[in-house]
Amino acid sequence: MRITTKINLLTTAWMLCILILVNIVVYFSFMKFTTNMEEVALYQKAEDILTVIDSLDSSSNINEELNDFLTPYSYIRIINPDNKVMHEITKDSLLLKNIKGKYVETKQAQTHLISAEHGEEQVLVVHVPIKNGNHTTGSLELGERLLGLETSKEILRAILGLCTLLAVIFSLLGGRWLSNMIMKPISSMIKTMEEIEMSGVPKPITIQNQTKDELHTMARTFNRMIHRLQENMEKQKQFVSDASHELKTPLTIIMNYADFLRRHGLENQEMTDEAINAITSEATRIQKMTQTLLDLATLENESSLELNELNLVSLCQSILNQMKQAYRREISLHYEEDPIFLLADELKTKQLIIILLDNALKYSNDKIDVFIEKDQQHTIIRVKDYGIGIPQEELHNIFERFYRVDKARTRKTEGSGLGLSIASNIMKLYKGEIKITSKEGTGTTVELFLPID
């Protein structure tokens, strides 16, 4: 069953239940109210009759006096304490036949159902005691057919039934309209998903009405997800393209030298050594690039760090000493206090610093300054070089995989262009921030903001 049909049927069923409950309350409230009004009228008539009876003397004809209070569909009885009918008058013999007299000592009102000429009818009977001082000498009984009530009941039932039928019809129509309105964005989303499934190309949903409700929010969320998928697909294509481009050159070199060795053998020792060295060098570069890609993929799948108390000053001093010996470059460390402790992952923090120093060494020939600072929320590591810098329009690309400042991909600077992408992923694990400021021809400053907590 379609969800629109379910919504329609459920809303209509719920509306019908409410209407039935309301109809029952209205019907019985009307019956009670009308009966109470009739009771009040009969009790008033009984009081008037008692007043007349009290004013009569022994020679008066009580039946004639009572006859003035008689209506076409009523009766009047006077019953003594022995439950014997003393006086009884009526213009409706059917009432006397179906309703027996009863002596009472307290005021009472009852309804009786009798079989009349046109079906069953209700008769209202009231009993009022007749007192002489403090003694009860009999009881007065009045009965009257509720003809108006029966007619009103029929009219009321017809009105309630008609209103219920109209309400059900309008509920079905309204439920259909409501379900269609609710399902419209969902149907659009389903259609879009089916098109995506068929074509394999993600596309957003067209949002026509800015209703600002949950369905609109769902559609916007779906569109954001599609937008992110499109971005990831573009990045994947770019990644494959860049990786292919990066691997193409060393593989071409390896194939050329291997082909040279296959054709010429080992006759020329100098050329043989050159070919072997080139093959080894390019194979090593491919191996390093592959390992870097694996590291990057591993980082993207990691969700936590192995945190331990770490002295950043000692760690940076150790790294800088190693880099100085390896590259024979001037690298200076600046800090305001020692030690500076931080809860951090030692291996990943070391990897971060090496990546920043490696980039600084590649793109500058002058000295490099490393600063360690603290504020209330972060421990800050700043690496500053005085090299070629990065154009302002390219700053937003530097965290992309395989991006390098030398777009011609010359071999003046070695590397795969994956370092800053790895650094960015490590900072995401830290829930920290990495900032880069640069001026072309002046140098670049990279700042790592590591949260203290």
Image: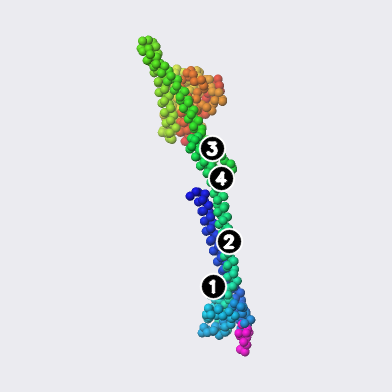
Q: Earlier in the sequence, mark 1 or mark 3?
A: 1
Expressed as whole percent of the image width and height from the top left, the position of residue 328 reads: 45, 17
In-front residue for pair 40/366: 40
| Residue underneath mark 1 | 120
Q: Residue furthest left?
A: 266
Q: CA distance from mark 1 to mark 3?
A: 69 Å
Q: CA distance from mark 2 to mark 4?
A: 36 Å
The residue range painted magenta reads 55-66
| Residue underneath mark 4 | 213
* Comparing labels 3 and 2, the label whose residue is closer to the camera: 2
| Residue underneath mark 2 | 162
What amino acid is found at the position of numbered circle 1 in the picture?
Glu
In-front residue for pair 111/385: 111
Q: CA distance from mark 3 to mark 2?
A: 48 Å
Expressed as whole percent of the image width and height from the top left, the position of residue 380 reads: 49, 29
* Comparing labels 2 and 4, the label whose residue is closer to the camera: 2
- The disc label shown at residue 204, or none: 3
What amino acid is found at the position of numbered circle 3 in the picture?
Pro
